[in-house]
Amino acid sequence: MASVLLTGGTGTLGRAVEHALIEHGDAVRILSRREQPAGRGPGTWAQGDLKTGDGIDAAIHGVDTIIHCATSGGRGDIAGIENLIASARKAGSPHLIYVSIVGVDSIPMSYYRAKFEAEQRVETSALPWTILRATQFHNLVSALFAVQRRLPLVFAPDMRFQPIDVRDVASHLVELAAAGPAGRTPDIGGPEILTAEEIARLTLESLGVRRRVVPLRFPGRMFAALKAGNNLVPGNPVGKRTFAEFAAERAVAGP
C-alpha cells in the first residue's frame, strides 16, 4: 500500500483520482487550502497553500508519492510546482507525478505555456518523476457548449477533440503511481476523435435542448495549431468511455 499526497483533490480529476487510489488500496491525503471538512479522518486531509508554500512541508511528510493535479493557471502553476518540489526535496524525494495536457509545447496559449514550464521544473527537480499529458476531459469540452444552451444559436469552433473521461485518466495515474518513476510517459487520449460540432450536438441532446449549431473558424496561431490536431493523440487512445456514454450518463443524472 502506497501513501499518496494528492493535490487538486477537490477538483474534477482529483475526486476521480482519490476514488481510484482508495479502490487500489492506497492511503490518500488531500492537499487543500480549505480547513478539514467534517467526516475526514486524521491523516486524510492536509491544509496548505501551494502558491505561498504554507503547510506544504507538513503535507508531504511521510508520503511515498505525490500526484499533482492542482492547477490555478498562469504563473500560479509555476509558483505551486516550485514550492511543491522544494518541500519534496526536504522530505526525502518522493515520486512526483505531474498531470499535464497534450499540446502544451506546440499550442501557443498562455495557460499551456505555463503548464509546459511547470513540466520543465519537474524534469530538472532532481526528484524521481513522471509526467503524463492527457487530452481534454469530457467535462471540459461539454461545458464549452452547455454554457451556450440558452442562446438562440450554439457556436462550435472548426476543430477536433479527442476527449477523455477523468475516470480513465485517474485509473492510468494509479497505474503510474504503482509502477514508479517513468519520466515523460506516452500522451493519452480518449477512444475517439470528434468534431466540435459533433460534441456540441451530443451535449445539447443530453440537456434536452434543441439549438442550431453553427461552425466557426478563427484566425491566429493558436487555432491553427488546434486545427492541425496538435491537441490529439490518435496513436494512443487509452480512454475507454466515449463522449456519447458520458453525455448519456449526464442526461440520466440531470443538470
Image (cartoon, rainbow, N blue to C red):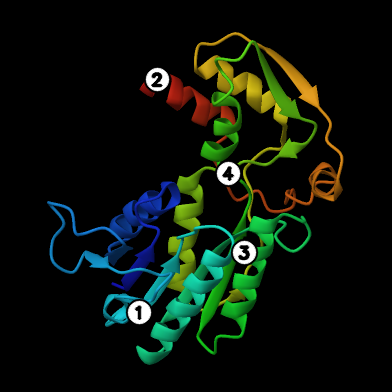
- Sequence-wise, which precedes: disc 3 or disc 2? 3
Query: Which residue: 65% across, 27% down?
Result: 199
Relative image position of residue 190 (x, y in whole percent): 62, 44
Q: Which residue carries the number 3 mark? A: 115
Query: Which residue: 49% across, 59% down?
Result: 71
The local secondary structure at tag 3 comes to helix
Left or right, 25 with reference to 136: left
Question: What amino acid does circle 3 point to?
Answer: Lys
Residue 5 visible, this orientation: yes
- Sequence-wise, which precedes: disc 3 or disc 4? 3
Q: Which mark is residue 164?
A: 4
Name the one closer to the observer, 231 or 79: 79
The local secondary structure at tag 2 comes to helix
Query: How far apart, in angstroms, are the residues tagged by discs 1 and 3?
Result: 24 Å
Query: How far apart, in angstroms, are the residues tagged by discs 1 and 4?
Result: 27 Å
- Sequence-wise, which precedes: disc 1 or disc 3? 1
- Sequence-wise, which precedes: disc 1 or disc 4? 1
Q: Which residue carries the number 2 mark? A: 252
Q: Which residue carries the number 1 mark? A: 64
- Sequence-wise, which precedes: disc 2 or disc 1? 1
Which of labels 1 and 3 is toward the front?
A: 3
- Sequence-wise, which precedes: disc 4 or disc 2? 4
